[in-house]
Structures are given as structure tokens and as C-alpha cells.
Image (spheres, rainbow, N blue to C red):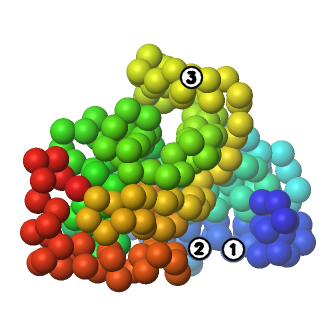
């Protein structure tokens, strides 16, 4: 089922969508007082709270009749520029702005991080620490590692002296590669998923820099990149030979937090084989921690 089908399921027919658009705009308009919008209220009592339609139109730089038709849910042509102007006047959050696009029948803009949601590091740290004794880490859009838990260090070999870029380390870290039984098969998937991330932001210099770096340091990456496979992030099976406990079979799952679309949380779950769960628990125990104290973590 495509995005349009999902939207239609939620919002119903086009008539229902336009009705939702009308109710949404009216409710957002009612929240903004003239003073908040920088308009004089004249001291007169208003029959309805918030801004009038004509005032929204003036502040957004659109015709009063056009805005009235928009709020009435008429089937009119709209542009992203005009919707952004209306969203600015109505002080819509990023989520509300995307909702406005959907109700108006346009593809919503890419999610953005709201200022109030930027400082989530403490909560995300609690999340991946609670995932112990299983490995977990968090990446930014360019696969730079933002944080990882102790199990990711012990099992996957994540450590400060790495490049701290997950895809660069995948291809260049001898410790991880030496442990991974599934490296060759997973390499194709990792590159295909990275291509999907790059394709979603073709003009982003951050992706260009990582791509140039990878092409320079890894001929294997360059060869796989030229095959042009593309996949969305999902689940990857990993088999690792750990020096203390032997075979570990885990499944990594990439997850997004809607309010932080710039971050990807990667959780590793033990598969029901090779006694993996018990081995991971032992590695996180005091005895296991003592046994894993090598010059290089892991």
C-alpha cells in the first residue's frame, strides 16, 4: 500500500480530506491572537477568538478570496510556497506543517528536528543503556556514531579510536571484520542502504564527503557502489565469532524516532540459536567484563 493509499485510509475521500483541511485551519487560526501576530486589536471585542481569515491572508501575502477558498476546503490549486507562508502566519510546528501539506493534497516536506526536541541525548542514552546486555548504537544521517552502549563495544568492537563512522568502520575496522562471519553478504546490504540514504538527499554535501572517503579507503565499497543496488534500512542478520564466547547470532534493527528524523537507533536482538542471549548476558556480567579487558575493547 503506497503513501497516498495510507493517507486516503486515514482521511477518507477527497471531500473528507478537504473538510479536515477546513477544520484544521480554523482551529490553528483560533490559537493566534492579533497581538501575537503583530496586529493591533483595536480594543474591540471579537465574536470569534484568534485571527480573522482576511488577516491571515494579508500576513501570508495571499488574496483574501483565495485563503477563504482554501479554508472552505474548495478544490483549488496550491503551492508549497503559499502553504509555507500560511504555516508561518499560523505558527505551525513541523508536524503540523507536514499535516497541512497532506490535507492540501501535496507531498509533505522532509521531517525536521524541532528546536524543543534537539536535546534528547539523555533520553536516548537511557534507551540504549536499558537495552543492555544487547548491543545498541545511534547514528546521524551520515552514519556517524552518536553514542553506543557497553555491549556494542564488547561485541561489535566499537571504541574511541575507530573513525566513529559506522559504514567507514564496517569496511576498514579489522577487529569487526575479523569477527564477522556474515561480512561479505552484509556488505552488499549495507552499501544498498547507504545508497538509499544518499538518494533521499542528493544535494547534501555531508553524504558526498562520506562517499568520497569510502571510495578512497575501500575498493570493495567502490565496487559494490557501482552495482547501484538500493534498499531501505530494516533488519540485518549478523553472525560474529567472539574471542571469549564463540558464535553470536544477532539481528540488527534500524529504527527512527519521528521527532528526531536525523537519528537512527540500531538495536541488536539475540536470535534463538547458539545460546546467544545467555552469552551476551555473561559478557555483560562482572566476570565477562573482566575477561574482555584487552588493549583494544572487545
Check disc 3: other Cα within 10 Å, few if <14, some if 14-19, many if 20+: some
Check disc 2: other Cα within 10 Å, few if <14, some if 14-19, many if 20+: some
Please give left or right for residue 208 compared with residue 186 in the image: left
Vertical side of 199 occupied by 93: above or below: below
Q: Which residue is denoted by mark 1 in the rendering?
A: 23
C-alpha separation, residue under disc 1 versus residue under disc 3 = 52 Å
Q: Which residue is denoted by mark 3 in the rendering?
A: 222
At x 57%, y 59%, the residue is 236
Secondary-structure class at tag 3? helix
Secondary-structure class at tag 1? helix
Q: Which of 261 and 82 lies nearest the eye of the viewer?
A: 261
Q: Which of 150 and 292 lies nearest the eye of the viewer?
A: 292
CB within 8 Å, label 3 to label 2 = no
Please give left or right for residue 99 compared with residue 172 in the image: right
Q: Is residue 283 visible?
A: yes
Q: Which residue is denoted by mark 2 in the rendering?
A: 27
At x 85%, y 50%, the residue is 76
Q: Quadrant of the C terminus?
A: bottom left
Percent position (x, y) of residue 195? 61, 36
C-alpha separation, residue under disc 2 versus residue under disc 1 = 6 Å
CB within 8 Å, label 2 to label 1 = yes
Amino acid at each position: 500500500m503506497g503513501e497516498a493509499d495510507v493517507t486516503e485510509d486515514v482521511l477518507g475521500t477527497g471531500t473528507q480530506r478537504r473538510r479536515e483541511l477546513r477544520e484544521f485551519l480554523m482551529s490553528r487560526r483560533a490559537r493566534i491572537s492579533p497581538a501575537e501576530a503583530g496586529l493591533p486589536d483595536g480594543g474591540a471585542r471579537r465574536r470569534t477568538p484568534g485571527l480573522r481569515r482576511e488577516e491571515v491572508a494579508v500576513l501570508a501575502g495571499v488574496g483574501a478570496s483565495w485563503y477563504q477558498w482554501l479554508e472552505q476546503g474548495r478544490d483549488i490549486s496550491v503551492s508549497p510556497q503559499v502553504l509555507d507562508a500560511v504555516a508561518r502566519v499560523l505558527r505551525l510546528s513541523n508536524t503540523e506543517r507536514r499535516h497541512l501539506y497532506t490535507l492540501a493534497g501535496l507531498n509533505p516536506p522532509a521531517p525536521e528536528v524541532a528546536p524543543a526536541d534537539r536535546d534528547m541525548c539523555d533520553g536516548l542514552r537511557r534507551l540504549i543503556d536499558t537495552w543492555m546486555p544487547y548491543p545498541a548504537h545511534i547514528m546521524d544521517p551520515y552514519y556517524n556514531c552518536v553514542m553506543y552502549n557497553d555491549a556494542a563495544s564488547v561485541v561489535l568492537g566499537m571504541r574511541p579510536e575507530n573513525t566513529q563512522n559506522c559504514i567507514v568502520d564496517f569496511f576498514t575496522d579489522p577487529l569487526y571484520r575479523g569477527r564477522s562471519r556474515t561480512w561479505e553478504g552484509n556488505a552488499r546490504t549495507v552499501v544498498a542502504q547507504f545508497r538509499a540514504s544518499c538518494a533521499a538527499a542528493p544535494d547534501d554535501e555531508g553524504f558526498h564527503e562520506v562517499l568520497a572517503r569510502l571510495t578512497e579507503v575501500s575498493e570493495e565499497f567502490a565496487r559494490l557502489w557501482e552495482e547501484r543496488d538500493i534498499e531501505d534500512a530494516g533488519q540485518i542478520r549478523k553472525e560474529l565469532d567472539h574471542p571469549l564466547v564463540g558464535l553470536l547470532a544477532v539481528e540488527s534493527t534500524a529504527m527512527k524516532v519521528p521527532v528526531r528524523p536525523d537519528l537512527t537507533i540500531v538495536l541488536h536482538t539475540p536470535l534463538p540459536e547458539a545460546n546467544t542471549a545467555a552469552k551476551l548476558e555473561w559478557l555483560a556480567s562482572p566476570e565477562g567484563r573482566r575477561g574482555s579487558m584487552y588493549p583494544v575493547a572487545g
